[in-house]
Image (cartoon, rainbow, N blue to C red):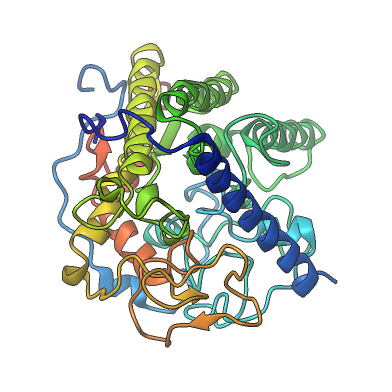
Amino acid sequence: MTGVVAGAGGGNKAAPATLRLHHYLVMAGVAAAVVLACLRYAPDPAGYGFLAVAPRPVEADAGARRDTTPPPRPSSSSVVIFNFGDSNSDTGGMAAVNGMNINLPEGRTFFRRPTGRLSDGRLVIDFICESLHTPFLSPYLKALGADFSNGVNFAIGGSTATPGGSPFSLDVQLHQWLYFRARSMEMINLGQRPPIDREGFRKAIYTIDIGQNDVSAYMHLPYDQVLAKIPGFVAQIKYTIETLYSHGARKFWIHGTGALGCLPQKLAIPRDADDGDQLDAHGCLKTYNNAAKRFNALLGDACAQLRRRMVDAALVFVDMYAVKYDLVANHTTHGIEKPLMACCGYGGPPYNYNHFKACMSAEMQLCDVGTRFISWDGVHFTEAANAIVAAKVLTGDYSTPRVTIAKLVNSTLPNDD
């Protein structure tokens, strides 16, 4: 999906007071969730560089990824992943930095205990790691039990691509990586052995999944003003890729954002009852989804520009919007009965989301274990949904160029012997 649907979101008919109300409700919901958490839990082909395009792969076996046996430990020559992002790929960073002792039902499925992931189980990045037979990534800020031998996860929940938009925005995550790399090189120069050596940094996969919070933060503005903000978000991601490249990174895996207008949190925002054209045929907010598609179009274009310049690198863009929107549009195919309703929330149908009584509150209304929902808490996906998303992502069918991440891992850099 690279364009904006014609006519949708072309004007903003809501009065300024209504826009402000939408903005304040979203901000109040975020603030309430943070306060609640603290109180409750604190104590070539030409154009594609050196990377050859793989043939269309066979659909991944989703059943195999339901195996609860932990993947084997990799050898020293195995894949290394450095991940940057927000809560969609945060494997415990936010919990670590805030000292949040999260309780069940977070993590109730695969892990059977809370891990700091904002889900009932595994995230897409976890399924990617499993597919590559490498352990789950440790958060950079995890004080105890971290293992950085196969990479580092710098993603933190609530993060933005925009500097200053959050405590751990993308520029901060980039500087954390620069620090980690500098200290590793220092250890090598001193004759010590760091978790990742020079070759590991050079051959690593650099994954980025961020931008959802940036787009969402400005959706209270008129649509044309939202569109005017998006190039700035993309520019920050582009700058991060360029900086990583200048420090030796050569393999990039970049995720676009999902269908924001299908999230229960967005759908639960009060809107004019007589404005029926706000929703599409599947009940999602058109303007939010069009903004997400515009973000993806610009990010895809930025990746194409970088690909032409960085001819000795491989840069893959993944259309996450198409993947995630399919979950809603074809929900019955995936065994999902209520695609727009949160599993853990408050208020019951149609969305089970309340901006002031979030999942994990004392009044939460929780779906039964085993029932298939897309949304876990109104914002983040369930493990069941993440498994479907990951299975599609791993085919390479939604990638530009059409390659799998396994192909990217095994690709040979131009100056390799």
Placement of 370 over or under 377, stated as above or below = below
Q: Nearer the viewer, residue 179 or 354?
A: 354
The x and y percentages for residue 198 are: 61, 33
Query: Which residue does the image show at 33% across and 45% down from the upper left?
Result: 320
Note whether 232 is above or below 117 in the view shown: above
Residue 168 place in picture, x, y as percent: 69, 41
User: Which quarter of the rendered picture does the N terminus lie within?
Assistant: top left
Q: Please determine whether, in this image, residue 400 is positioned above or below residue 73.
A: above
The residue nearer to you, when weighing 76 against 203, is 203
Residue 315 appears anywhere in the view: no
Residue 408 picture location, percent across and down: 35, 39
Question: Which residue is found at the position 34% from the left and 29% from the top?
Answer: 11
**Residue 230 visible in this rendered orientation of the protein:** yes
Q: Residue furthest top?
A: 309
**How many numbered marks appear?**
0
| Residue 47 location, quadrant | top left
- Name the foreground residue: 69 vs 319: 319
Give the image location of residue 73, x and y in percent.
52, 65
Relative side of 91 to 398, left or right: right
Q: Residue, x 42% and y 52% (percent of image)?
A: 271
Query: In front: 384, or 111?
Result: 384
Left or right placement of residue 122 versus residue 334 in this view = right
Q: In the image, what residue occupies the spot 37% across and 78% down?
A: 67
Residue that protrudes farthest toward the right in the picture: 43
Quadrant assignment for the C terminus:
top left
